[in-house]
Each structure stands twice: as C-alpha cells, then as structure tokens.
Amino acid sequence: MKRRSPKRSKRTSSKSIFFQFFAITFCICLLVFTSSIGIFATVMNDRPMDKGDVATQREREITEENMDVLIPGEGIFAADYADSKRVNVLLLGATDEGLADVIMLASFDPESKRADIISIPRDTYYERAGYSGSWLKINAVFHDGPEAMCQAVHNILLGIPINYYAVIDYNGVANIVDAIGGVPMDVPFYMSYRSEGITIDIPAGQQVLDGAHAVQFIRYRSGYDNGDIGRVEAQQKFVKSAAKQALGLNLPNVIKTVVANVNSDLTNRAIVYLGGKAVGMDSNNISTAMLPGTDGNIAGLSFWIRGEDYAIEQIVRAVYNGPPTATSEAAVEQEGE
C-alpha cells in the first residue's frame, strides 16, 4: 500500500475549512461502494469527491496492492491488516461548531463483498495531553480536521488502518435520501423535539422517511432511555434500511447527488475500483457494531468509557477474521470468572 503522510491542521472552526456538517448515515458509504458508481463513473470527470486540495489524482490503475492508505495498520492485528484486501473509510458528520456528531468506520472487503460498520459514540472519552473537560470527548477532535479524527479512531480501534474519510452535512443527507426515494423505517415512538433552530416531529409507526424527516430521525436523541447510545442504535437500523433501498436502485442521478454533497479524499480511480468490486453486493452482507463500553462520569461530565482492549479485539477480529490471541483468551476467561 502507498503511504500518505497525514497533514496536521491548526485548531480552527470547521466552518472556515469545510462545510457546515451535521450527520452522516451509511447510505453515503453504500453510494460510494455500490456497483452503480463503477457503472456510471463517466459522470465523474473532475475529481468530484474532492472539494479541497487533499486528494490527488493517481494516474495509474487502483488495485488491492496499491490502494491509498491515510493511516497504516499497526498493533496486534498488524499481520492481518497487511494480508487483508479491506478498504476502510471513516464516515463523519459534524456540527457547525466543529464537533463530530456521528462517527462510523466503514470497512469493505472487495473479495467477499462484505461491509462492516463500527460506530463510535460521540461522547467517547479520548484522553489528549493539554485538554480537559468536554474537550476530552472524541467529537471535539474534529476541531483539528478529519485527518485528526482518523488518527483518533485508529488509536481507539487498536491500530486499525484507515484508507480514506468522507464528510457530509445534514443538507447533503437530506438530498441523498430524497434521491434514493426515501428510507423505510419503523419509528418506535413519536419523536418530538423543539429548540432554537431545530424541530423534530415524526409520528410512530412504519413509514418512508423523506430527506427532511430522515435528518430529524438521525438527529433525535432525547427520547431514548440510554441517550446517545440509543441514537447510535437507531442510526444503525437506518443504515441497514438505507443500504437495502440504495442497493435496489439504478443510480446515475443519485451518484451526481452524492458527488455534489460529500467531501472526501477518495480519488476517482479509487471510487471506480471500489464500485466495480461491489457489483453483486447483497444488503445482507452488511453488519454493524458499536465500540464496547459503559456510561461514566468524569469531573461532573458524562462520557462513554470504552471497554477493555480484549472487548475491542473481538470487534476488530470479527471484521478481519484474525486468529484469537493469547491475551484475548486469558482476558475473556478472567472476565467470566
């Protein structure tokens, strides 16, 4: 794999660097990975996913052997990472205050056509020297830019490699959901919330969410007994429904919508390669997981405290199908005592 040196960004409002971001769903990932992108790649002539100067056009064919990698894999699964053909994309949605509101690592295996999503709760405790209070929540890392978020997720997930990132604002989510004809969802209860600039009003029951209501659904948090964790679980259900909907469509129009609304360092050649490899992908080959952990309180602030390394190992192993490690087996046995 070709190694790209991560750039360091100065702390500043994401508003001055990127678009105003809010939320992201796996439909974005699917529209990046789905076969239609490869089939209709002719609509992508001018590095369409690149809205800045991060991506560079590669004048060569993309293969598993020379796929770009932003942050290389390391740690206990380093050998599995090196042998794997997987491509990992960090999907981010953030507020205009520069906080990542949704964090998902999407991993795609071009051989098995399997996709795995690992969600990172936005309140996850992430220690950084020189920071305190709410700045120790992982969502605050986005102040330093998407590449800093890639490094943080890489660290939390035990050195998992990250090839690319993709970011979108909530207007982009709405536009893409409308382009795929809406997302079927069984809304578990009446979702109602109002504050300055935000109105959420979705009746309970089976329905097809249009773009505006899809954004409301993935933003809603207050009514879940377990707060943000409940919202993460709801987002994952939304992800699977959106994926099933997207995979059943002929998408030349949708691709143009994605191109216009997603900010990513994915190059054209990588998109075409991934799209071609995703031909025949089945929505049943999509699995979701969440960073294991528990609610905690530090200095009067609520955090999601990530679980022990052995618990995270199980999540990573499920993605990479790596062999059990002695450390993991011992830890699991001790946990069961």
Image: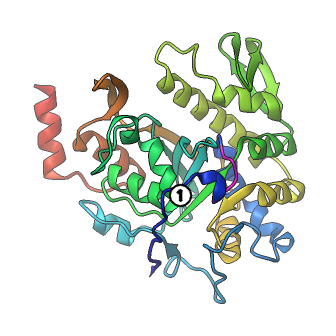
Along the viewing direction, whichever of 217 and 84 lies nearer the viewer:
217
Q: Is residue 158 left or right of residue 240?
A: left
Amino acid type of the residue tagged 1 in the rendering:
Pro
**Residue 100 location, x and y as percent?**
54, 44
Q: Is residue 188 left or right of residue 132?
A: right
Along the viewing direction, whichever of 230 and 152 lies nearer the viewer:
152
**Residue 236 location, x and y as percent?**
58, 34
Res. 190 image quadrant = top right
Res. 16 image quadrant = bottom right
**Residue 30 location, x and y as percent?**
68, 51
Residue pictured at 64% horizontal, 37% vertical:
240
Q: Secondary structure at mark 1?
A: helix
Main secondary-structure element of the magenta-colored stretch: loop
User: Which quadrant holds the C terminus?
Assistant: top left
Residue pictured at 80% horizontal, 46% vertical:
176
Q: Which residue is mark 1?
A: 146
Along the viewing direction, whichever of 113 and 268 lies nearer the viewer:
268
Q: Is residue 307 left or right of residue 289?
A: left
Dot 1: within a 10 Å radius of its alpha carbon, few (fewer than 14), some, or many (20 or more) residues?
Answer: many
Q: Is residue 151 left or right of residue 217?
A: left
Span highlighted in magenta in the image: 17-21
Residue 270, compared with residue 290, is above or below; it is below
